[in-house]
Amino acid sequence: MNRLITRVTLAVAALLVLTGSPASAEQRLQISVLSSPRPDLVSDQDALIEVRGAEGLVALTVNGKPSAALRQDGRRGSWVGLVEGLKLGRNRLIVHSGGRSAQLTLVNHSKSGPILSGPQITPFECRTVQSGLGPAQDASCNAPTSTEHFYRSTAGVFKPLTPGQRPADLANVTINGQTLPYIVRVESGTLNRTIYRIAVLDDPAAPQSLEWTPGPGWNGKLAVGFGGGLAGRYEQGTNKPQDALEDLYLSRGFAFAVATGLVNGLASNAIIQGETLMMLKEHFIERYGVPRWTLGTGGSGGGIQQLHITALYPGLLDGLQPRVAFADSTVAAHVLDCDLLQNYWKGQGGSVWSPDKRRAVAGFASPATCENWVRFIASSQKVTNKAACGLKDLSLAYDPRSNPKGARCGYYSWLVNQLGRDPKTGFARSPYDNVGVQYGLRALNDGVISVDEFLDLNERIGGFTQDLVFSPVRTAADPRAVRRMYTSGLVNPGGGGLGLTPIMQLRGYQDPFGDIHDRQRDFEVRLRLIRANGDADNQVIWVAPKGASLVQPSKVFPEDKVLDLMTQWLDAIASDPAPLSHAKVVRHRPPEAADAYFDDAGDKHMAEATMDPGTAFNAAYPIYLNPRIVAGGPLTNDVLKCRLKSPDPKDYRVAFSHDQELRLRRIFASGVCDFQRPGVGQVKPAGTYVRF
């Protein structure tokens, strides 16, 4: 059965548990897992299961032994229970009711992972002590699960709550018309080599059953925060309980979760990140209940994760709020292009390049953008930059002379399970390629740079060695790595679950200020959505006033209004019993959830976001490009290695002399990029929930 269909079926089953639907006497006896997307993706020895279609008592056996896990809930019309004590590997569940039987095989995996992502990368350093969890119990960085309480003060600050006390400055919060003390329970624990925190409103003084369950403060919905950055670090990362104390969500009754493994600046691999979210959500469902829906939030690399995980792992997130996002982490290639350009401009070019010429070649609004890409990101991709590995023990890091088998820093090293290893070096195969790329082509055709400047740039731009050290020779990707980037889905295809998910993309307009989060990226996402799904009607683009803060997004947008709109949208989808489809998602989009920009006074103007420079939207917030698009690449920005053709005079709006034409053909002896054709190895992904 198609994996996406399987996931949607389970999502509908989970919704029925919440809303209730009486079992029909003619209904077939069915057993399903609610806590995982598929029965073979269970972890940590337990699973929440549901039985439907039962007549009378239900008897359950697990691996041949009777289990009393199931309990009947007449309101829900099913039997639901947490099956515990599963063994690693295959577990056989059989239910009997009214002379009928049904069975299900669960495949249980370690809470330490992996499940789908392949062998875990080593070395790997734990950070449980730095995160307040105490020493790690094993090499997988596990630590005991703990809980603590915080309260929101009347001054609007979260403070630790001393057990048994009721502080004088304790604030109240109203949830579903009920006034409750604003006290938050934070659970801290580990899974998949990740430190997680889950926060939910909870009054520890309220009467509790023998086993804790969420009280009336939980609205039945879950929000997950995703962190930014772009890196490949060999460490667990740190966080603290306070990182889960998001007032915007908790004050509305949401449960809110964060995890170190969902920070893109630690390990930018959407397959591992999606696996971590899958395991975190499984744990949440088993301990808290099936959420009515789950919403993502976060900016930059946090936006990348929401979009990319949803493409690869449909159904884990039901709504996305990516801020200043990119389509995926292959933006690393554009970082390296900027590194080459900056290196050229520092002197290799042999000529003086004005800011206007640099701007035209790089494509960004400001020449400072490429400088910032190099300053902020490129150094973290350098294999020989030992600090970028995040290791305290630097002796473990790669050194081409003293430790050639050590941990190689950078983004590509963390994709080794997907890219494969070069048998000659043992390193991850590299998909970076700039063979045939005509840097500055548009700048040449627009008359901003001369033919000689264009030729000199492309003759001297060079590439990188396998250690990302500058080389006078252009870099040729490993074709197998390129193809695997596409088949694995690491180049976000725009499909998977993205067509079935409401997306509200938010961006503060920073292009003129050299910020790397340029506005064109929203259209990379939109165009990929259109290609995969026929339209992008489930995506909303909002752009904030110029110069708005990115550090404090609440000052960029009325985020409470964004959340209110997303809540309205997702509630409508969840209340509709029709099967989940793209048309259903679009049908329930609120009228106010439409493309818009905010002027300097903060007033909202609803207008379709397009690439047309003549619109009022784009007059207020012009769209710029990047080095690969200036070189003729597609606006989808998803060609890793171009197919080649002979230079064609029709591609240039300026005349070349005979000598210049000979030089052009010498520079591009193997040909120039033909972006009218799909890239080398550019194929559809192998599927969703793929195992490596």
Image (tube, grey):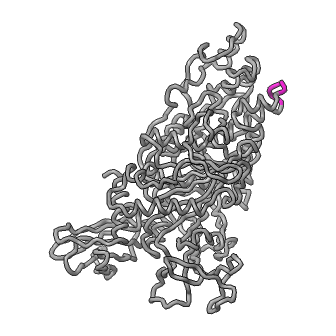
Magenta highlight range: 347-352
What percent of the width, then of the height, locates residue 481? 54, 39
Q: Quadrant of residue 93?
A: bottom left
Task: Tell me which secondary structure the magenta stretch mostly adopts.
Answer: loop
> Between 448 and 666, which is closer to the camera in this rendering?
448
Tell me what residue is drawn at x 76 percent, y 46 percent: 375
Q: Is residue 129 above or below residue 3?
A: below
Per the image, is 91 magenta? no
Q: Is residue 675 above or below residue 60?
A: above
Q: Is residue 302 above or below residue 642?
A: below
Per the image, is 349 magenta? yes
> Between 447 and 120, which is closer to the camera in this rendering?
447
Q: Is residue 194 above or below residue 320?
A: below
Q: Quadrant of residue 616?
A: top right
Tell me what residue is drawn at x 64 percent, y 74 percent: 241
Tell me what residue is drawn at x 55 percent, y 72 percent: 252
Residue 223 can be seen in this image = yes
Residue 381 can be seen in this image = no
What percent of the width, then of the height, locates residue 337? 68, 36
What percent of the width, then of the height, locates residue 627? 67, 33
**Horizontal relation, residue 65 to residue 117: left or right:** left
What percent of the width, then of the height, locates residue 401? 74, 45
**Horizontal relation, residue 310 to residue 368: left or right:** left
**Horizontal relation, residue 374 to residue 114: left or right:** right
> Between 266 and 53, which is closer to the camera in this rendering?
53
Say how many tags the image has: 0
Tell me what residue is drawn at x 28 percent, y 68 percent: 31
> Between 58 and 218, which is closer to the camera in this rendering?
218
